[in-house]
Image (spheres, grey):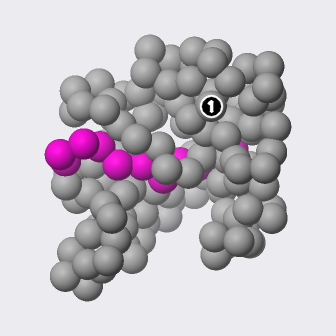
Amino acid sequence: MSICEYSLRRDSTRQLSPSFKVREFGCKGSDVVLLDEELVVLLQCIREHFGKPLHITSGYRTAAHNAAVGGSKSSQHLLGRAADFWVEDTPVASVAAYAETLLPARGGIGRYPKDAKHSTRKTGWVHIDTRANKSRWSM
């Protein structure tokens, strides 16, 4: 699969899969949205597996926005290969465990739970990306 470039002005309502539109992956202050087609397929699989709404909180990021939110300088979000999201009424651990079945030998999966250690988070979330190597972490 490949990285596609979209315009929020022109393509905002374009349906990428049964559950996702271009606008859900957009970055504040940018008309351009870079997006890996494989990422959309993975998110659609997760949405269908749990049968509940999946909310994307961060998709493509410009370098300026990535720096503003404290993202890694080598973030996959900069390439359109990553999304941070949560699934309604579903624990972060369950979502990450299912994501692991989709990307057992590669890709990035990060767990950001709302727990006693992170009680100020509005919700927990999962990061998933389509990098070639395998990376796993919990924050």
- Left or right placement of residue 10 versus residue 53 in this view: right
**Residue 78, percent from left and from top:** 73, 55
**Quadrant location of the N terminus in the rendered image:** top right
Residue type highlighted by circle 1: Arg
- Left or right placement of residue 94 versus residue 81 in this view: left
Tell me if residue 104 can be seen.
no
**How many numbered circles are shown?**
1
- Which residue shows up at 43% across the image and 21% down it? 19
Question: Residue under circle 1?
Answer: 23
Tell me if residue 95 can be seen.
yes
Q: Determine the secondary structure under disc 1.
A: helix
**Quadrant location of the C terminus in the rendered image:** bottom left
Above or below, 112 relative to 2 = below
Name the residue nearer the viewer: 31 or 42. Answer: 31
**Residue 73, percent from left and from top:** 74, 72
Residue 28 in the magenta stretch? The answer is no
- Which residue shows up at 24% across the image and 31% down it? 52
Above or below, 128 relative to 123 = above
- Which residue shows up at 78% across the image and 55% down it? 62
**Residue 83, percent from left and from top:** 53, 48
Magenta stretch bounds:
80-90
The quarter holding residue 2 reads top right
**Residue 123, percent from left and from top:** 31, 61
- Classify 10 Å Cα crowding around label 1: few (below 14), some (14-19), many (20 and above): some
- Left or right placement of residue 98 versus residue 74 in this view: left
The quarter holding residue 10 reads top right
